[in-house]
Structure formats: C-alpha cells, structure tokens
Amino acid sequence: MAPHQRPRTERGTVLPSPVVILSVIAVAMAAFAFVATQGSEPTEREITPAAREAVQEQEPEVEEKAEPAKPKPTKKPAPAIKRGEVYVEVYNNSSVTGLAGRVAQRATGAGWQVVGEDNWYGTVPATTVYHPPKLERAAKLLALDLGIDRTLPATGAMKLDRLTLILTGELD
C-alpha cells in the first residue's frame, strides 16, 4: 500500500439500479398522494335535526297555508325470514375444543339449516356473523337468536349463498 493512501475500512452495499429506481418512484408516489389528499374536506355534510332547527330559526318566518297531509306510500313488509331455508356455516376461531359443534347444534335447535362446521384459520377480533348482501336481515336474526353482537358483510373466500358464523369464544 502506498504511504499517501488511506486504508479502506468502510464497507457498503451496492444495490442494483432497478431496486433504487423503484424505491425512488415509490417514495415520490407516496409523497404525491400525501400532498394531494392533505387538507381535503368532505363535500357532503350530514344535517342533524339540531342543525336543521338552527337553520330554521335563522330564516324569517313565513306563514304557510296548511295543506292536507298526503298519505305516505306504504312499503310492502319484507318477507318473513324462514330460518330453515338459510344455510349457515359455523367456524371455530378459538382454542375451545368442540365449540363449533356445540354452537351448530344450538343454531339447528333454533331452526337454522347448518350445513357445515370446522375450524377457521385467520384472525377475527370478535364472534361475528358474516353475510352476503341479500342475507343481511337473516344474519341479524341469527345473531339475535345466538346472542351475538356483531354482523358484517361477507369477505374473501366466504360463500355468498349462506351465513358464515366465526366464533372467537364461548357464547353466553
């Protein structure tokens, strides 16, 4: 080694240029998204009854002629939910052995058509009845029958012709 050269003790890593370029692009896109969404206010506002009253108080009072009240069109009541016609799958997402089987028997006893029970692999924060859009009312009824507080729309690989009950612990 020459007397005027310093020894090289620093070591570094050379990254391939595509990795560096993709990293720079990702950071730039994140910065752009942050700036673009910063400070935006919702374009719609919900008017609560208290806000409506405040608006009405500010407006000058104008005498209105009383018009005969028009009868509101009545909606046809939704058809009754027939528990035996709704498929239900029960999954155990807890360490309690046999929980899905016991709850499946309880649901069957309440009239529901339980078509399967098994273990659920994943993370669910609380016992939940998942439902496709057309079975939302049935999901709420099943939750009521079993004492469950949580219903949500079906997600992922859940079947859209049935309710999916995922248990995270014993029911009361």
Image (spheres, helix red, strand yellow):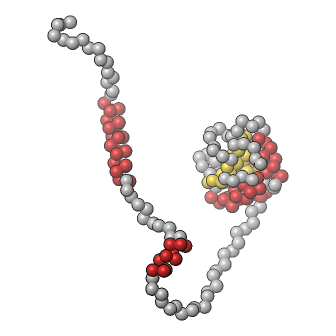
Residue 119 drawn at (x, y percent): 70, 39
Residue 144 drawn at (x, y percent): 74, 57
- Is residue 162 among what the camera can see? no
- Residue ranking furthest to the bottom: 65
Q: Based on the displayed image, in which of its 4 quarters is residue 14 positioned?
A: top left
Q: Residue at x 75, y 43 (%)?
A: 170
Residue 90 drawn at (x, y percent): 73, 46
Q: The N terminus appears in which quarter of the rendering?
A: top left
113 and 3: which is toward the camera: 3
Q: Residue at x 69, y 56 (%)?
A: 139
| Left or right of 122 in this view: 28 | left
- Residue ranking furthest to the left: 4
Q: Based on the displayed image, in which of its 4 quarters is residue 124 positioned?
A: top right
Q: Residue at x 80, y 44 (%)?
A: 102
Q: Residue at x 62, y 39 (%)?
A: 122
- Is residue 88 among what the camera can see? yes
Residue 149 drawn at (x, y percent): 69, 53
